Image (spheres, coloured by chain):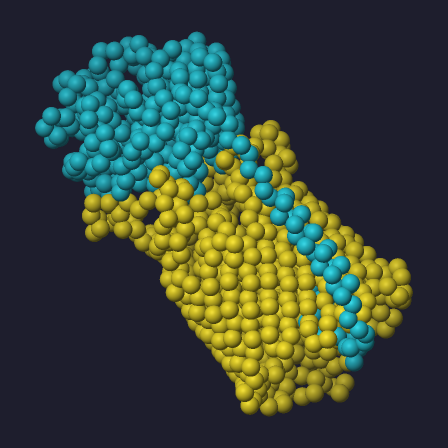
Chain colours: A yellow, B cyan
Amino acid sequence: MTSKILWSSLVLIITLTAFETKAQMIFDTLYLDEMEIISNQFEFSSPTKSQSIDTITKKELNHLSLAELLAGNSTVFVKSYGKGGLATAAFRGTTASHTKVLWNGFEINSPMLGQVDLSLIPNIFYDEAILEYGGSSLESTSGALGGAINLNSNKNKSSETLNFEQAIGSFSTYTSSLKIDLGKKDFNSKTSIYLNSSENTFSFYNNAIIPAEWQIQENASFYNRGFTQEFSYKISKFQSVEIISWNQWNFREIPPIMSNQQGGNNVEQQESFTSRNILKWKFHKSNTVIESKAAWFYEDLNYLLKTTTATNPNDTVTFINSTNISRTGFFEAKISQILKKGWLVSVEFRFNRSTVESNNYLEIKNRNTYGLFTKVSKKFADFLEAEFLIRQELVDNEFIPPMPFLGFSAKPFKTEDLFFRISTNLNYKLPSLNDLYWFLGGNSDLLPEKGIQFDAGISYSKKYSRSVNISADLSFYSSYISNWIQWIPSDYRYWTAENIAFVNARGIETGLSINGFANKLFYKISAQYSFNKSTNESSEAIEGGYSGRQLIYVPLHSGNVFAYISINKFQLNWNTQFTGKRNTSLNEETQYSNTLPSYSISNISIGKGFTFKKSEFELKFKVNNIFDKSYQAILWRPMPGRSLEVFLTIKIK
Amino acid sequence: MKKITTKYYAVISTEQPQFNGGWEWRDLLRSMTFIFILFALLLSSCKNDEPIPELGEFENAVFIVNEGNFTAGNASLTYFNHQSGEVEQQVFYRKNNAPLGDVANSISFDNNSIYLVVNNSHLVYKINSETGVYEAKTIELTSPRHFIKTDDHRALISDLYENNLTMVNTENMEIISKIPIGRTSENLLKLDNDVFISNWSAYNQDLKNNMVLVLNTMSLEITDSIQVGIEPNSMVLDNDNNLWVLSSGGFLNEERPSLLKIDSESKLILQRFIFEDISSSPTKLSINPAGNTLYFINKDIFQMDISVPTLSATIFVKASESSKFYSLGVGSDFDIYISDANDYTRNGTVYRYSPQGILKQEFEAGIIPGAIGFMD
């Protein structure tokens, strides 16, 4: 046995030195198996703040994308250009580029944009979503000044061999998904297939033109088609290997804004293909975990804009065919060890190399990143836990300053699950390759954005009886981000990226959840609310008189409510999301301008399951935007009113 | 197995807890009440629409046409009463309950109406000159830029991408015809039966963008053309009816910028002033009502007498480090209005100077104040 560990360590060291790797990863992910065993207990003990999206919620939204999941069930702000359109996430008063999305531990942010389009992540392609707020994201990655979203696949065999779901919705929307789970005890194969398309021809009241009229949204169709395949093999009692592959084809039309009547036969669309592949080897024995992973991500994104004159559809005026290919290779190795007396140590090396080939760059551009991660935590008896971690990165032969995190959590009462936590950290976010090299306007002299962050929180959980379980959380945070990158007009006629703003983002997040049983009835209610104040406090902003003004598209208030009841295979699901008003410019709010009104959207679904021999069927009806609320998430981008969906699910054990 | 989780769950798990007690309705009721109170609070925090303050009729009006950001649909119209000093923002929205659109480019007037060209919304709005209320619109334009009345019932619209001018009926704003001119068009200036058309953009044409074309309003045909500098961006007529054309020299600084004085009758170039710095980009040539003093933007604001023999413009207003002078106009009272786009994402500022160069007033406009129009 010792020889096996030695052998593994040797392999690890050889690979590390040979490839000058770099490491990473959340400790918990390694212990996923254990976590599931104890999953009806809640550990609030960590000094970091993370949140797992509820499985009922996720199941309800499996036919949709991560954009809809986060919009309805977290306080992360999702900026959506409409159904099927670009959707990005921003945590805690920051922007989309401060949010990192990791799939099985690897960052899927586009190396070009530095962002992720959440509408292209079908919920069926991952099993678990964990949100890490602010500095807590340093557990998984660097540079996520807002936070990180971890999407993980669950390698354990599910109870269903086959799960097929067909959804048909308003506006010619069709979604089919299929999951096949096969395997014997050592070998497991999981396949997920997702096909989603929509004409997206919803009607909306266009009050951006005179005279105002009801219109049908045109040129907004989209499709997303893809599959994931996972193979896992248990080599021995302590070792396993996994291969995971995610391939997806996407297409969307980009409609003009409400005020722009068509002049000519314009075409604006985006097409993309992504392939993401991971190979994982893991050794896990008692208190030791060693893991080595490699990944290869490929993305090919095409943007097409063609405009013609109003008089002649063959007279092309603008023709932009932007082709962007990015390839990223990753390698990671990590060792974690639980020592005596409550000590835990983990060390990780990482390396990744991104290559971008774009007709918007003057030449092919690369970025090489080496990273080292060390984490030490210690439990002092049962009432105090301390955690220290540090990341160090070397990017294109330049050292980024170290990124340390220090946190404590305390449990003052032995019998009460009441926890206090406090933490502080430093974090650096690199400029994206577009910020550096986009032609025209990219600025290769940009510095990384620097975040100094503070976080404190209280969490509480209590099981009063079978019918009442309560858990609650209250967090406070404050971040100071300097060298914040903005694209601003240059002295010439194009915009350029500069380290210009100094942003202070601070706020409060609260969450409350209650569940329980009443005989055969299971219920669950949860509510979340967040307050985010985010302002630019740079000297330019102070001089310009807009320093105290909330940044654009950051709602001061946002929240959601979720209710679920199930009894005898009958289920009822209610969700309301609330988004406060948002500034669309940094100016003082004047009449009818510079702000978008707040909105709240409610959805309800009713379903019933039937069992037939070894199969299970479920029929479900869903009404989205029940109150037919007319709203805009982004200025003059219409959103659909009330819409219907019908689902049929077949499960075979 | 050792329990190691460091994750905190804000939303609790769905695993069913063990049976260990009876049903407590009161607990459930209490928690539900709490949730719904919270929910109600959330909702109530969002509903309070401000009452719309009344807006009177336009008088002594100076209008600032704010472009807004491309594809954001946040163009707007600012009204300034140059007698009372009163400023009103968003007047188009307030009069019509609809936004002006995406990238408003220019404004023109006749006795009863105001015409607003909204470039990326592909339209021209006609509104009442006293009330500001919508009257008619021309739609299905490609990329409209400027509007000029050619007689009591007709007008021409220039286009950045189309090789035609569009002629419209100004009563109902319907398109009468397209007039092919073989080039794209920008500024339009009328003198008697001639309309001078500058060819600013090289987009969608094989020809060099260095011409001013002359269209006869009777025959609706191009009767003449004048070669000027590359990218002519603005034109004015002086008190001798000479045409002044300012060219920036091209987007990629192909040549040095130039200012040309042209005899509007013979179409001959009388004087040619060449700017020294090839990388400079002078724009927005304007003239005072007496027709003897020119103004333009070349980072700073310059002033020049029309009778000077060489290019001897003097700085009228010096730009500060942060200022982005964007537009310029001279009112009937000879006051000079200068707009500053600030950082192009916030509201701009307008400065009003006396002809002696004394700052008389400063007021806020909308996002990217791009055109200044004087109604009297």
Question: Which residue is more in the foreground, B127 or A348?
Answer: B127
The residue positioned 40% from the left and 56% from the top of the image is A202
Residue A154: percent from left, percent from top: 62, 76
Instruction: Identify the residue shown where x is 50% and y is 51%.
Output: A629
Q: Give A395 or B218, whichever is nearer the viewer.
A: B218
Q: Quadrant of residue A259?
A: top left
Query: Does residue B345 lie above or below A155 as drawn?
Result: above
Q: Is residue A222 above or below residue A423?
A: below
Find residue B69 and report its image quarter: top left
Left or right, A524 with reference to A632: right
- Mark yes or no: residue A89 visible: no
Side of B163 where A173 appears, left or right: right
Q: Which residue of the protein is positioned furthest toward the front in this rendering? A: B25
Q: Residue at x 80, y 70 (%)?
A: A465
Q: Quadrant of the N terminus of chain B?
A: bottom right
Give percent across and percent down for residue B131: 38, 24
Looking at the figure, which quarter contains the C terminus of chain B? Answer: top left
Classify A446 as above or below A36.
above
Vertical arrangement, residue A118 with respect to residue A426, above or below: below
In the rendered view, does A2 fall on the left or right side of A490? right
Q: Is residue B167 visible in the rendered structure shown here? A: yes
Q: Quadrant of residue A31?
A: bottom right
Which sits in the foreground, A5 or B355?
B355
Q: Whole-percent x and y of residue A193? A: 47, 76
